[in-house]
Image (tube, grey):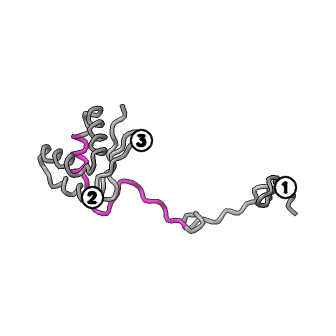
Amino acid sequence: MVPVEILPFQENIILRARGSELLIHSIHVKKLQDLKKPRDFSQYFRAEALVNRPARKLFEAWLRKDHTLWPRLYKAVHGLSLSSESSLPLPDPETKDGRSFGEEPITETLGTNRVTSTLGDSDSKIAKKS
């Protein structure tokens, strides 16, 4: 079984396994960091951080399959520095046309034929470029 991924993102924590994700909001992450006893940590996590029943059920299913989840989650929360850092890289700034800054625009001709059609006309006409 693939273990549950624990991904710090901005000031939140994302738990991901297969096609499911749980988001632990930053308010709860900060409170969890203050809890030093593992028992208090797990009680708060189940009762408060998992905000609805489907989230709790999913997490419990993950716990049954991944016995390393609690210790890894505890270490991830307490080892997390919640400044403005994020473990995920930020995207490069781009211009309006999708190019990165400093990159030259690409101009090339993709072919000598073009397809033209009019609304309501099901036939496409191929015309040569002049």
Q: Quadrant of residue 117?
A: bottom right
Which residue lies at the image location 17% right of the left edge and 49% below the top edge?
44
Given this view, does label 2 or label 3 mark the residue nearer the observer? Answer: 3
Q: Which residue is mark 3?
A: 19
Residue range of the region highlighted in magenta in the rendering:
70-94
As measured in the structure, the alpha-carbon distance from the residue carrying label 2 to the one carrying label 3 is 22 Å
* Label 3 crowd (10 A; few <14 / some 14-19 / many >=20): few
- Badge 2 marks a residue whose secondary structure is helix
Q: Which residue is mark 2?
A: 26
x and y, in percent, of residue 99 in the image: 58, 63
Q: Is residue 102 magenta?
A: no
Residue 125 - label: 1
Q: From the viewer's perspective, is residue 32 above or below residue 98?
A: above
Name the dominant secondary structure of the magenta segment. Answer: loop
x and y, in percent, of residue 37 in the image: 11, 46
- Badge 3 marks a residue whose secondary structure is loop
Are dots 1 and 2 in contact, CB under 8 Å?
Answer: no
Q: From the viewer's perspective, is residue 95 above or below residue 22?
A: below
- Callout 3 amino acid: Gly
As measured in the structure, the alpha-carbon distance from the residue carrying label 1 to the one carrying label 3 is 44 Å
Given this view, does label 1 or label 2 mark the residue nearer the observer? Answer: 1
Image quadrant occupied by the C terminus: bottom right
x and y, in percent, of residue 70 in the image: 22, 40
